[in-house]
């Protein structure tokens, strides 16, 4: 049993419908085993290593692994999403003028909405393993860098045309 010792503690104790104040120099609180306040942790709260262990147990038991795979792929793709955002943001920052800050903010909100809509879509399809929802979370990580490279080539071509003209 895990225990937490509170030094110079004051607390309220419920006993038979009455509340009694308790003051103690060392107050011992017994903590439940497992995660949280007596409940198991959800897949969204687990670390990647905990998800791997859960996935292995599910494979051994013959259970559906799709929700666990979605969370594992979500964590990995989320870690790499900054590359796509940066590749898209650089050409937009080059083309933007100081007066166009509202357009930049609106574009950032749209990109964020698109990114999270794919994550929500994948999590909503966890019950349909034949659709392979764990691959859906990777789509923005391929879409945004491709768009960024395309925008970069347009910025580069505009710079070449201006220097020649």
Image (spheres, rainbow, N blue to C red):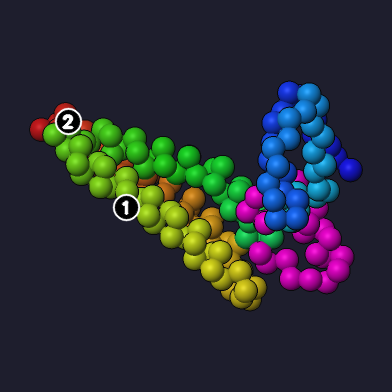
Circle 1 SS class:
helix
User: Looking at the magenta stretch, what is its main secondary structure?
Assistant: helix
Residue 62 on the magenta segment: yes
Residue designated by label 2: 98
**Marks 1/2: CA–CA distance:** 20 Å
Question: Residue at the spot x=68%, y=66% of the render?
Answer: 66
Residue closest to the eye, 55 or 20? 20
Residue designated by label 1: 110
Q: Relative to 75, does residue 155 appear above or below in the rendering?
A: above
Q: Relative to 5, does residue 2 appear above or below in the rendering?
A: below
Circle 2 SS class:
helix
Quadrant of the drawing holding the N terminus:
top right
For label 2, the crowd category at 10 Å Cα-Cα, with few meaning under 14, some 14 to 19 and many 20 or more, is few
- In the image, residue 19 lies at what x, y percent? 68, 46
When asked about the image quadrant of residue 87, the answer is: top left
Question: Residue at the spot x=75%, y=51% of the render?
Answer: 15
> In screen coordinates, is 155 left or right of 76?
left
Instruction: Specify the segment rendered in magenta.
Output: 40-67
């Amino acid at each position: 049993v895990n225990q937490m010792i509170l030094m110079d503690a004051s607390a309220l104790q419920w006993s038979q419908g009455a509340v009694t104040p308790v003051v103690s120099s060392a107050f011992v609180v017994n903590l439940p085993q497992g995660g949280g306040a007596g409940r198991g942790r959800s897949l969204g709260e687990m670390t990647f290593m905990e998800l791997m262990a859960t996935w292995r147990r599910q494979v051994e038991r013959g259970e559906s692994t799709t929700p666990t795979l979605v969370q594992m792929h979500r964590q990995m793709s989320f870690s790499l999403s900054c590359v796509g955002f940066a590749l898209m943001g650089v050409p937009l920052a080059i083309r933007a003028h100081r007066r166009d800050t509202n357009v930049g903010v609106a574009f950032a909100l749209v990109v964020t909405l698109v990114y999270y809509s794919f994550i929500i879509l994948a999590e909503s399809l966890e019950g349909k393993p034949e659709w392979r929802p764990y691959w859906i979370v990777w789509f923005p990580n391929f879409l945004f860098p491709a768009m960024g490279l395309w925008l970069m080539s347009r910025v580069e071509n505009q710079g070449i045309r201006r220097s020649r003209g």
